[in-house]
Amino acid sequence: MRYEKLTIEGRNAVIEAFRAGKTIDKLFVLDGCQDGPVRSIIREAKKKDTIIQFVSKERLDQISETGKHQGVIAYAAAYQYASVEEILKSAEEKGEDPFLILLDGIEDPHNLGAIIRTANLAGAHGIIIPKHRAAGLTATVAKTSAGALNYTPVAKVTNIGKTMEELKEKGLWFVCADMGGETMYRLNLTGPIGLVIGSEGDGVSRLVREKCDFIASIPMKGDIDSLNASVAAGILAYEIVRQRMNIK
């Protein structure tokens, strides 16, 4: 994977970034600005299905690093995204059942980076994140992953639920973490599998939860009722590793 500039400011720089095929996570546009160059930028963004936010000049000034944004700022991914097909191909080339981690709305970049690190060490073939309401591949994510982002591919999709349906057709089963589920040690988590981890506050959304084949709970003995999302991902990922290695 290749490191790229994160913040792109100015009309010419932003339009050239789109035309050069750079992965743009989000585009900020001055609210009410609709002149020719800005319309061209918005048109390119829509072609790429990029998230567009119309914001005030004060907001643009706040996030600008140069003070010369000309009414547009783009956030580029720190690393290039993979495709879901590339992740599956990686598993096939290794002769292994696919092991994917799907994140349903993880917004904290430190959690995302930590999960990528765990995914790499647990042998997961890749991670899938949604386009909206989720952290992208920022420099903070790259740093927190401790280098794992160089080896573990991350795919970004428009709809996690639809992606799960497509992966089910390819033979994958899905397990998500939820307090009301079956104790994870009693579930068969071998074979082609996708581990679904929900957001830091709300957990797995109802629509995504309904598409899961297993609901796994992590035994807890303390006085609080939830784990950090990256910790929960690590515990469940290594239960999958244990079962794959057939360790009693």
Image (cartoon, helix red, strand yellow):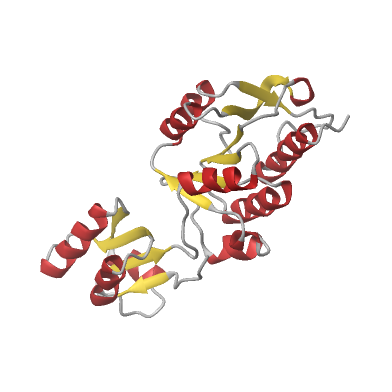
Please tell me which residue is depicted at 29% across the width and 75% down the height of the picture. Answer: 13
Task: Say whether residue 33 is visible.
Answer: no
Direction from residue 94 to residue 13 in the image, left or right: left
| Residue 182 on image: x %, y % | 71, 19
In the rendered image, the residue lying farthest to the right is: 248
Instruction: Name which quarter of the figure residue 247 lies in.
Output: top right
Direction from residue 58 to residue 242 in the image, left or right: right
| Residue 164 on image: x %, y % | 48, 31
Which of 104 and 166 lies nearest the eye of the viewer? Answer: 166
Instruction: Name which quarter of the figure residue 45 lies in.
Output: bottom left
| Residue 216 on image: x %, y % | 68, 25
Which quadrant holds the C terminus? top right
Q: Is residue 144 above or below residue 135?
A: below
Please tell me which residue is depicted at 68% across the width and 52% down the height of the picture. Answer: 120
Task: Say whether residue 36 is visible.
Answer: yes
Please tell me which residue is depicted at 47% across the width and 44% down the height of the picture. Answer: 84
In the rendered image, the residue lying farthest to the left is: 36
Please tell me which residue is depicted at 70% across the width and 50% down the height of the picture. Answer: 118
| Residue 229 on image: x %, y % | 65, 42
Which of 16 and 124 lies nearest the eye of the viewer? Answer: 124
Which of 16 and 199 lies nearest the eye of the viewer? Answer: 16
